[in-house]
Image (spheres, helix red, strand yellow):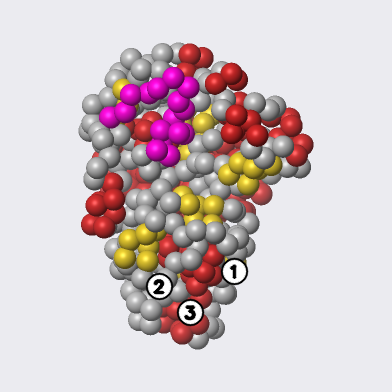
Amino acid sequence: MNTKEYVDSFKRYAMLEMSLNGVPASITLAQGILESASGNSKLCLECNNHFGIKCRKNWNGNFCLADDDAKDECFRGYESPIESYRDHSLFLKGSQRYASLFELDPTDYKSWSHGLREAGYATNPEYGNLLIRVIERNRLGQYDSMVVLGQDFYKSGSSPVIEYNGLPAVAVRPGNTASDIAKENQLAEWKLYKYNDLEKNQMINPGEILYLKPKRSTASEQIHIMKRGETLHDVSQLYAIKLKSLRKMNQLSSNEEPVIGEEIYLSEKRETKPKTVKGPVPMSTASTIMRPAVQSVTKNIPNTHEVQAGETIEQIADKYKTSVLNIVRWNDLEFAEVSTGQILALAPGAKGGSNIQSVSDAKVSMSEVSSELKNASIHFVKPGETLFRISTQYGVSVDQIKKLNGMTTNAIRAGQKLKIR
């Protein structure tokens, strides 16, 4: 992909984000061009991370490990490019260090460029000038004007149609109603509710993705691990699976919600139902609250854990129904690795050990791989895992796994089903 192709592919995402969150489209596109090498960087191709945003302590989603200032640093991973664009806007908007930028004229890309550098977005002293050169060379300022002046698809204030999970969809804009969106897209309002598993007249929120065609019965991914605050409806929207199909595959009734850490099958029937709590949780608050029933499931988890010989960070995360990323964040780990005897915090604010041995000391030797793993033939990829880590876990080579699964790169995704033997 060259720069022009990149701009043509993502200018509408940038304009949408400017309309919703106030970050100039020219700035978003220029940063995407610089940070992702016009969409060609490994981080962009394998993790949909267009802006090089690292995990930091407030990130609770998927992540990828990549070398930057240090080896195997944690970078945010996204299901699709539009999620990366949305998170970029929220990353800037939600940080106090960038608050003054939102008081600038939205078409003043020069002040925004220098302001980002001064606020510490990048360490390169020429970062502001680099952004300005990219903007002017590619005439990106025109997209700021189009938003401000209401041109192009923003003229009527409508939500532009995008492709999400291979289906036509819209990202809800402030002030949009289901009736507005249905009318703009020549769709009966009841169909919009039905396609998105919503109750009639249910409130929709800015930034939500609504599908304009029926969702599918299965997904290409295999498994989703439930996160804090997620509902089954969230999962159905994330993978474009009908909620009814998702419940049937996982043997769940309409008033049951899976608990944190449970595996939700996305493409085949699960033999046993996951652990559940009674629901449903109100969808308008599902992503922002901690359900009391879930708290009762997790309240007995200890605050710390001492790493045993041969124990991996993935095993610890599984044991305590949390994610590898949470353990990395709560313990300020530089790498997603642990060492024998290390005391790990299992909750925000809990006190863990600060002395971390070298990465090489923390890795499990081949002799420590259990016979059960050595005989396994299938592995479901967990968030944060790499092909090298999986090959070491099972005592096989990376090339062997790639050959068995018809893979040409080392890229893998959470929930993917891999043949091991």
Relative depth, front residue between 35 and 325: 325
Give the residues drawn in magenta, as a range.
304-319
Percent x, y for residue 332?
34, 26
Label number found at residue 194: 3
Residue 317 belongs to the span the image colors magenta: yes
Q: Earlier in the sequence, mark 3 or mark 1?
A: 3
Q: Earlier in the sequence, mark 2 or mark 3?
A: 3
Relative depth, front residue between 123 and 288: 288
- In the picture, the quarter occupied by the N terminus is top right
Of tags 3 and 1, the one toward the viewer is: 1
Estimate how packed mark 2 is, as few (under 14), some (14 to 19) or many (20 or more) residues with alpha carbons within 10 Å. some
Does residue 371 show up? yes
- In the picture, the quarter occupied by the C terminus is top right
Task: Indicate whether 18 appears above or below 66.
Answer: below
Residue to which mark 1 is pinned: 217
Relative depth, front residue between 204 and 321: 321
Cα gap from disc 3 to disc 1, whole angstroms: 14 Å
Does residue 54 show up? no
**SS at mark 2?**
loop
**SS at mark 3?**
helix
Task: Look at label 3 and name its amino acid.
Answer: Lys
Of tags 2 and 3, the one toward the viewer is: 2
Residue to which mark 2 is pinned: 254
Residue 173 belongs to the span the image colors magenta: no
Label number found at residue 227: none
Percent x, y for residue 236?
49, 64
Relative depth, front residue between 404 and 25: 404
Percent x, y for residue 321?
38, 43
User: Which residue sits at x=41%, y=13%?
Assistant: 357
